[in-house]
Amino acid sequence: MSSNNNNVRSVRRRKGNRIGYYLKEGFGSVFTHGFMSFAAICVIIACLLIMGSFSLLAINVNQIIGSLEDENVILAFVDDSYTEEQAQALKPQILAVANVTSCDFISKDDAMKSFTSRYDNSLFDNMDSSVLRHRYAVYMDDITLLTETQMALKNIPGIATVNASQSIAKGLITLRNVVSVITIVLAVILFAVSLFIMANTIKLTTVERKEEIAIMKMVGATNRFIRWPFVVEGFILGITGALIAFLFESGIYALVMANLARRYTMTFINVVPLSVVAVPMLVVFLIIGFFIGVIGSAVAIKNYLKV
Amino acid sequence: MIQFTDVFKTYENGIKAIRGVSMELEDGEFAFLVGPSGSGKSTIIKLITGEVAPSDGTVIVNGYNMGTIRPRKMPYVRRTIGVVFQDFRLIEKKTVYENVAFAMRVVGATNKEIRQRVPYVLDLVGLDTKAKMKPMELSGGEQQRVAIARALVNNPRMIVADEPTGNLDPARSLEIMMLLEKINELGTTVLVVTHEKEFVNNFSKRVIAIDNGHIISDGLGGYYDYELEQ
């Protein structure tokens, strides 16, 4: 029993020693190879800044498209023969249609007021509101289901016709798809580029230590023992790069926001505030920094472990 | 123990380095491996340390079959062999003590074990007073003794020395040879690859002579044939 306890203690001590060694070597190497570490961090910062800036742009474009979509309403006109009360009674049926989030009833009088307010009133002085129809402004959840929603509304008894701006909707959908695809493609390319540059930067530090690695292999070091200090080093570089990139990106974003707010012509742009994007951006940067650092260093060391 | 049975090694570029070598080195033996450049000596060392695998035949090192061993197991075989090279292969930025301790650290030794073992081994090779010096501050002979201390520190079953005196003057070479003999007397198997005819002939140990990939002679109290060099 006591022998078992001693063994367990010995194994723990060895494991603790080893982890201490990995951390000490990893941290030490960041400073020993100062210039290379600096270069690797700069690469990560540059890639994350490009990736982050484009992602933030995409998020804001999506937000603007989203608000434009919200304004893209379907107008459902009620049959001429329906009284105002009968027309209002259609609301539950309209709300029951899939993809409809809300709807506003617009009476003939309200429609006339809205219509005349847009033009010179004197032109429509003698015009009676009875020439118009009661109508509903219907708001959707997903603009891509515009046609289906339009058809479903048309099928409601009492709805005479449904008007929807198909071309605007299609334009918005296309724009959003294009922005999404470009963002994803750029993110993947930049991630791969960062990984490649990071791996090569760490590879340069490993060239200096090739002899040391060969000696380690010769005296019986396992690949894991050799690899871990490099992984720790990559982790430190990745996380440091990510944190600095986050600070830069936040600063740039805040600056751009402040600049936009000052311009009167830009006030219609509904941007996402920094407070909303900051935490997700930090998390994403840290995750990417972590992977670039750790995978990059693991890839860099791979060739030297084959002996 | 080392056991070669009808071993062939052909490299990817077609060079046939070893052609049907069979030999055996028992535990506790001391042997010289001699032969001209390109004879296959280095390939034999590489086969022993697992740097290359045999193309045909069987190589058994301390109970491990080097032809079929899984890469994951290789570090554990290497821990049973201490290797000494002609160019010492010391880490320049580390002190003598750290160079030796490093080999123990690699195999997962605790700080306490390292503190106990390293001074003992440095004393054994006569470097106990130079533990804090860097390799570049030492003479060639002293650097080779550090390399031997590093090879010894994990208490391997065997020391393989590849031209250990190649970079040393005769007096230092003699010291190193005597040190290897002392290590052998303590029970460690020693295989020395060398060109130093005088040592080979004066030490009167087993000599395995190789030429053109074949073992051409193998005998106790051996004699290094001078014609082999030409």
Image (spheres, coloured by chain):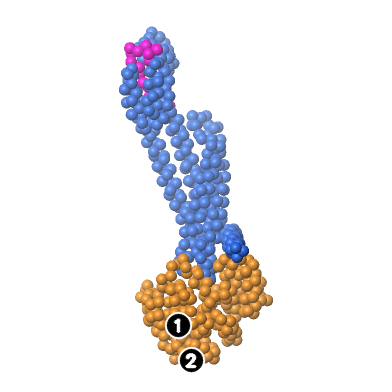
Q: Colour of chain A?
A: blue
A65 to B17, vertically: above or below: above
Give percent across and percent down for residue A60.
47, 36
Tell me which amino acid carries mark 1. Answer: Glu
Chain whose colour in the figure is orange: B
Q: Do the dots labelled 1 and 2 sit on one chain? A: yes
* Mark 1, other Cα within 10 Å: few <14 / some 14–19 / many ≥20: few
Q: Secondary structure at mark 1?
A: strand
Query: Looking at this rendering, what residue extends furthest in the front direction?
Result: A1
Q: Secondary structure at mark 2?
A: loop
Query: Looking at this rendering, what residue extends furthest in the top direction?
Result: A126
Report how far apart the C-alphas of labels 1 and 2 lie in the structure. 18 Å
Tell me which amino acid carries mark 2. Answer: Tyr
Give percent across and percent down for residue A170.
36, 32
Q: Chain of mark 2?
A: B
Residue positioned 44% across, 76% down in the render: B60
Q: Of tags 1 and 2, which is closer to the observer? A: 1
Residue B200 visible somewhere in the drawing = no
The answer to whether residue B170 is left or right of residue A90 is: right
A280 to A166, vertically: above or below: below
Give percent across and percent down for residue A11.
58, 63
Q: Which mark is residue A174?
A: none
The answer to whether residue B221 is left or right of residue A178 is: right
Q: Chain of mark 1?
A: B
Residue A202 visible somewhere in the drawing = yes
Q: Which mark is residue B223?
A: 2
Magenta stretch contains residue A252: no
Residue positioned 52% across, 78% down in the render: B158
Q: Along the line of sight, which residue is nearer the eye, A211 or B46?
A: B46
Which residue matches tag 1?
A: B24
* Region in magenta: A71-87
